[in-house]
Amino acid sequence: MTDACKVLMIFPLFNANSFWNYKEACDLAGARYPAAPLGLVTVAAMLPQHWQIRLVNRNTEDLTDADLDWADMVMTGGMLPQRNDALHIIAQCHARGKPVVVGGPDVTSSPPLYSAANFQVLGEAEEIMDDFVAAWRSGARQGVFEAPMGKTDVTKSPLPRFDLLKLDQYLHVGVQFSRGCPFSCEFCDIIELYGRVPRTKTNEQVMAELDALYALGYRGHVDFVDDNLIGNKKALKKFLPDLKHWQEEKKFPFEFSTEASINLADDADLLRSLADTNFFAVFVGIESPDTDSLVLMQKKQNTRRSLQQSIETIHKAGIFVNAGFIVGFDSEKGSVAAGMIECIEDTSIPVCMVGLLYALPTTQLTRRLLAEGRLFSGSEQTQSGDQCTAGLNFETKRPRRDVLNDYRTVLKTIYDPVAYFGRVRRLGRMLGRKRSHRMIKGDLRSFMRLVLRIHRAGPGTTGAFWRMMLDCALHNPKALPYVVMTSALYLHLGPFARQVVSEIDGEIENVDTGHWQAPPMLKPVPAALVPA
């Protein structure tokens, strides 16, 4: 029986070539990385209380030999863009004779790629960590522990060990209210990993998490990391009054962001409640303005409304929208660039995550492409970036060159500084903030750094920035903190878009000159025989 254990939790590096890094915005705020590793600190709370636990986030600090030498066991794992470093960590641990436990969405989707790990924890950890701990205590030094998909009772999820985090290293900290999404988008792995029936924590659980952050002295941006916050509207509407009361009692120490589907715009009462509770931003997956594409990808909820009117409704409620778009669907009949650019401009969404379609493991899309014999082999082995730079791991219906050209056209156009700050200006006029931004320590310093560095984002940026700022100051000064936030992101997004455009230009040239050849296809497998 092993009663004591030193556990080193290591959060792997995200690949540097990513839309989500926001390094310059972090630097403005004196942070090192956008988001804290909520998954690992939640797992930490499932371990025996007397075990010693340390956390090293490779995105914010160095992993040293002394860290590894201290540990009896290493726990690591994460998402697809962390795969390369997670595998490196496993090899590093083996070299020093340390057993490694790997968990998280990527190993759950692709267990064979992590066969070098001593232990695999597949699926949601709440129901199987006790089994793992018992096995470890009994002397086991390898094994696989698997939870049924989407069945975990999240009301049993423990209070995350926020005390393990160096909170000042992050732009925001996450909490979770629900898991799962009621929709069935073909390209999405959320429903495969966490199910289509959103499960919610109790109000008391989430309040306890916020209390813990507050007690640790944290103030500012808290992100609800839910796959779709409004997936269970009934539960959310019961939760928001308690959250509002908590905010009022504490004098609104937190501002919230989240992810939700576009039908949020249909519910005026819910929108009002979110705004009253101090939600200020929401990520929405728009994917495409083309109805045929939305129907093919089973995102029909986006076809039942005017996107422009829906986004305007959310903006006027005081919540600004960030959005996801994808190029490369089979249903694209011709060039989609003009329609996508028009949609982005019409909706006045500054921050748009435009990616190339990527067939993720376990999705309906991957099963279909595999059945059709169109999925490239080898694409599952490495991940060099995110869907901005590592998409199209399959044979496209349209000529590959045309898809790539549409993608680079969209990116080049929407991240031109005049276009970007034009959307920020229109957002600034629309944003119906009723509550003033809570000035926290460092806001003025961050703004001064932004003023001094805005020119670094490229020619034409400075003038476009100041015209937008003046317009917002004159027409809607309550929106100023939020247009400043959005401007800070351009320090990353402007140069990043130009870098991606340059890479895509190189890919197009390789196609034109015959230097790009399609990789071998995986052998077709009937869809019914492909594991879900």
Image (tube, helix red, strand yellow):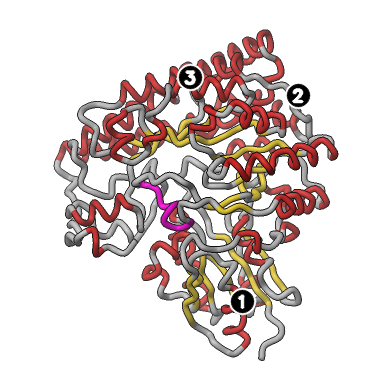
Q: Which residue is identified by label 2?
A: 436
Mark 1 element type = helix
Q: Nearer the viewer, residue 359 or 483?
A: 359
Instruction: Identify residue type, mark 3.
Output: Gln
Neighbourhood count class around disc 2 (C-alpha, 10 Å): few under 14, some 14–19, many 20 upward: few
In this rendering, position of residue 76 left or right of residue 285: right
* Residue that badge 3 annotates: 309
The magenta-colored residue range is 187-194
Q: CA distance from mark 1 to mark 3?
A: 49 Å
Mark earlier in primary sequence (2, 3): 3
* Labels 1 and 3 touching (C-beta < 8 A): no
Task: Please say if the residues under marks 2 and 3 sit with CB atoms less than 8 Å apart.
Answer: no
Q: Is residue 378 visible?
A: yes
Within-10-Å neighbours for mark 1: few <14, some 14–19, many 20+: some
Q: CA distance from mark 2 to mark 3?
A: 25 Å
Looking at the rendered image, the quarter that the N terminus falls into is bottom right
Q: Residue furthest top?
A: 474
Across and down, in percent, residue 131 comes to 57, 79
Determine the residue positioned at 31% across, 36% down.
295
Disc 1 marks which residue?
A: 130
Q: Main secondary structure of the magenta part?
A: helix
